[in-house]
Structures are given as structure tokens and as C-alpha cells.
Amino acid sequence: MSVTIKSKLIFFALLIVSFCFIETALSIYAEWDMKWYRREVRFSDWRNTGSLDYSTNAMITEWYSKKPVKYFRIPAMAWRENKYIYQADINSFYNRLNSGDTLTVGIDHRGNWNESKEILCQIVPEFFNQERYYFLNTVYVNEQVIKLKVWKERDYIRWKIITT
Amino acid sequence: LKKYLPILLITLIGAYLRFNGLGDKPLFVDEALFGLWVRGEISSQELFPVLLLKPFNPSNEFSLRLIFALAGTLTIPALYMVIKRDVWIKSGVALFVAVFPLFVFWSRMARPYALAGLFLVLGWKWYAFYIPALLTTPISLIGIKLFNQKWYVLAGAFISAIIFFLIRQDTGENGEDFFKYAFTASRFYYLPALTIILYVCNYKK
């Protein structure tokens, strides 16, 4: 191989490597996007939510809080979690509300998944008007978690955002 | 020292990208599942890393991800050692693996791919490393060096991967989701990409 071709090859190789380095270095703190090598990974910051009764992302909640938590979604299991011990037991949620319990619910970007959204629409329909829905999506994109307090008062379900 | 200076520098670049802010991001759902296996009930899936981490009882993101970032970093000198080409090609391949986003991103996650990748590269020289690789993730099957490095082995590896995904395909209503996921998820390309690098670089006419 001649020296000119070799030097050109080295130049292009260094160009590709530099591009990769910059792309990788910038991606460390980047928010979620559709980049091909990380689009299936979405982070949500559950570190300060503490223990909860129900969560849209039960496994992460349990890891951080070290306490068992139930899935906040209808019982349609995702294929990756169908062998795991967690069961979506949303009937117990309504039973506990009816018996007068005040429950804490953690919602992350999975609140936008149909399995959780279906329940969320019934409990906090206000979230889904245009203005609030924008707020909800902003929270998800910023990797935040909404912590709700839910209780029942005279046949109506009441809720309050504790933290975001 | 002069002989090993290039690979040392490349490894340092790779280490910087893998360890910089390693514990800053919160856990991703699959990492949490892995963390729960380490903490509690052992699963047959990802058995090797679970058993490896169990005595250390990792309590934060950094400690849970550390072993995988280390494995991803060590893959760089391991490749350099295993590839039998001149120093320029070996260094070029090592540098590519050190900075390529796919390899860096999955080395920074508490997922088994970087660890299995290290074992696959080492298995190219010492077959015994295929055992921990397979106990880390069954996708390692794709990287096992079968015969001489011929084109049909590479083609065979691709066909095996497709068969593997078809076998793993769940039955029932979520089956379609899995099939779609298996081909679009970047994690499933980590080990095949390393395998292709090994085959291409060690190709003999």
C-alpha cells in the first residue's frame, strides 16, 4: 500500500474515532433520545421517592426503597417481566381505597404506557387535559417521578402531588 | 514500556469514557431487576455476574455497574492481545472498541453484555472462558469460535443468532413485541459486533 493511501486511511480512521469519542463523551449526561444505541433505555430518578404502595416501575422502586411495592397497572404483563414475582394487582388498589386507606403512588414515564395510563385516566383525569398533559410529559422527559397521595372521600377519589 | 504505550493510552481513553460519572444516572429497569437478583433470590439468568457481585452486596449505582465498566475496559487490551495482526491494525481495532458508542454505553450499564464480551474475546485464545461467558448470557453462543475463520462460519453465526431469537420468541400475545424488540434493541448487537471484529481481524486466506 502506498504511503499516500495509507495516510488517507489513517486520517479517515482518526476522523471516525474522534467523532465516536465526542458522541460518546456527550452522551454520558444526555437526556433520553432516539439514538440507535440507547433508545430502549429510559432512566427515571426514583432515588428520593422512598417507599411506596404502588409504582409504575415496581422493580426500580423496590431496589431503592428496599421494600416491596405493587405494580400500578392493569394485569397485562410485559414479556420481559412475566416470569418475575411482581403481579399487577390493581384490584387490591381499589379495595384498599374503598376501605379508607390513603395510598402512595409513584409514576414515571411508564405512566404513559397503556397498562398504567388506563388506571391513571380514571384516578387523575385532570392529568390528561391539554395543559396538564404537557406537564406530565415534561416530567417524564426530565427523568422525574411524580409521587401521588390518593384517597377516597365520599365516593370520590382524591389525589395530591407530594413531590416531582 | 514503549511497546505497550499505545494500548495503554487507548485503554485509558476507554476507561475514562466508561468510568466518568458512572454512578450519576439512576438505575434503568433491567439494571434494577439485576440488582434485585444480586440482593435476593438468585435467577438462573445472568448467573455468573449475580454470583460474582453477591458477596459485595452493591448498594448504589456505581458499585452495581463497576464490574461491567471494568470488563468493558479490559476488553480493549484483551482484543489487542488476541488479534494477530500488525500493531497498527490491533491498535486501530482497540481504539474503535474504546470509543464506539455501542460498546461504551453498554459497558456503563449493570447488564451482562460487557462482561460476556470480555470472556468471548479471551475465549478466542483460551476456550475455558466460554463457560463464564455462557453463564453470563446465552447470547454468548454467537461468539464461540468454531473452526477456522472462514466466511461460512461468519454466516453461520448470523443464522445461529436468528435461530436463537426465534427459539426465544415468547408465545402468546406478547410474542410479536419480543420479535420486534430483539431486532431493534441495540443490546443484542454488542456481542455479535465483537464477534464480527474477531472474525474479520483474524481472517486467514
Image: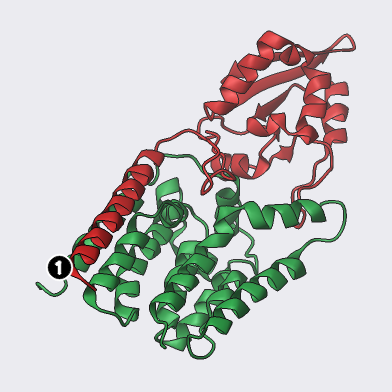
Chain colours: A red, B green
Residue drawn at x 43%, y 75% as measured from the top left: B200
Where is the N terminus of chain A found, in terms of image quarters?
bottom left
Closer to us: B96 or A15: A15
Closer to us: B55 or A110: A110
Residue drawn at x 49%, y 55% as measured from the top left: B110
Where is the C terminus of chain A found, in terms of image quarters?
top right
Residue that badge 1 annotates: B5
Residue drawn at x 53%, y 71% as measured from the top left: B48
Left-right relation of A74 to B26: right
Closer to us: A119 or A149: A119
Q: Position of residue B60 (x, y in %)?
A: 44, 46
Q: Position of residue A20 (x, y in %)?
A: 36, 49
Amino acid type of the residue tagged 1 in the rendering: Leu
Residue A116 in sight from this viewpoint = yes
Q: Quadrant of residue B78?
A: bottom left
Q: Which element carries disc 1, helix, strand or loop?
A: helix
Residue B60 in sight from this viewpoint = no
**Mark 1, other Cα within 10 Å: few <14 / some 14–19 / many ≥20:** few
Q: Which of the chains bears the disc numbered 1?
A: B
Q: From this viewpoint, which residue is outermost toward the left?
A: B2
Asked if A80 appears above or below B161 in the picture, the reply is above
Q: How many marks?
A: 1
Asked if B104 appears above or below B164 in the picture, the reply is above
Q: Position of residue B177 (x, y in %)?
A: 76, 51
